[in-house]
Amino acid sequence: MRLWTVQHRAVPEALAAAGEVTGDWGRVLSPSYRPAYEEMTAEMARRGLDCAGRPPLWAWHGPDTRDDRVALTAELLLNPATPQEYERYAVLDLDVPDEVVMLSSYARWNDFMETIFLGRGSPAMDWSIDAEEYGAPAGFRVQACLPRLAAPWVLGVRPLEPSEG
C-alpha cells in the first residue's frame, strides 16, 4: 500500500542504522493525546497489529505527490514557521505491506479526539471510512497507522518544503 509520512529528519538515519523504527511515548506531541493514542493501539491490536505497548506511527494513504496536499497536511499538523523548523522534517514515500497498516478516517479521528479532550458525548471511535474520503483534500483524508516503520518500505526521502499557499 502506498503511503507517505512526515517524520523528524533523524528517522531516515535511524532506519538506515537499525532497519526499523517504532513509536515512543516520550515523542508524542502532547501527553494529553495518550488516551486517544491508546485507543488507536487497542483497535490495532484487535485487528492483529501489535504495537508492543508503544504508540503507532502515523502516515497518510497514497503516494508522496510532492505537491501542496502533502505540505499543507504537514503544516496543519506540525505548524513549522521558519526555514529551520521545516529543516527538522522529512517526507518519506512508502510502500508498506497491507497487513501491517490500519486505515481510518482522519475526520472521525478528530471528532474522537475532541470528545476525549472536551468530555462531550460518548468516547467511542467510529473506525469506518467513507468512500469520498479517499483522495479528499488535506485535513479530510484517510490516515494510516503502523506498529513500526521498516527500511525496505521506504521508496524515497525528501525535505519537507513550505506550501505555495
Image: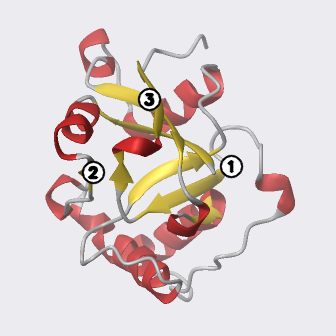
Is residue 118 shown above or below 42?
A: above
Q: Residue at x 81, y 65 (%)?
A: 130
Question: Left or right: 94 with respect to 131?
Answer: left
Above or below, 17 relative to 53: above
Does residue 125 lie above or below 26 as drawn? below
Give the labeled residue for mark 2.
20
Looking at the rendered structure, the secondary structure element under dot 1 is loop
Quarter of image, res 109? bottom right
**Horizontal relation, residue 141 to residue 113: left or right:** right
- Mark 1 vs 3, N-terminal side: 3
Residue drawn 77% across the image and 54% down it: 133
Residue under the image location 41 percent in, 84 percent down = 42
Nearest the eye: 97 or 148: 97
Where is residue 33? Give x, y as percent.
32, 65
Residue in the foreground of this view, choosing between 27 and 90:
90
Disc number lying in front (3 or 2): 2
Among the 4 quarters of the image, the one containing residue 136: top right
Q: Which residue is mark 3?
A: 91
Give the x, y percent position of residue 129: 74, 67
Query: Of residues 163 and 160, which is closer to you in this image?
Result: 160
Find disc 1 in the rendering and name its residue: 140
For the rendered model, the colour scheme is secondary structure
Q: Secondary structure at mark 3?
A: strand
The residue carrying pointer 1 sits among few (fewer than 14), some (14 to 19) or many (20 or more) residues within 10 Å by Cα, namely some
Whichever of callouts 1 and 2 sits on the residue coming sooner in the sequence is 2
Q: Amino acid at mark 2?
A: Glu
Q: Residue at x 65, y 79 (%)?
A: 126
CA distance separating discs 1 and 2:
29 Å
Tell me the mark number nearer the camera, choosing from 1 and 2: 2
Circle nearer the N terminus (3, 2): 2
Look at label 3 and name its amino acid. Val
Q: Amino acid at mark 1?
A: Phe
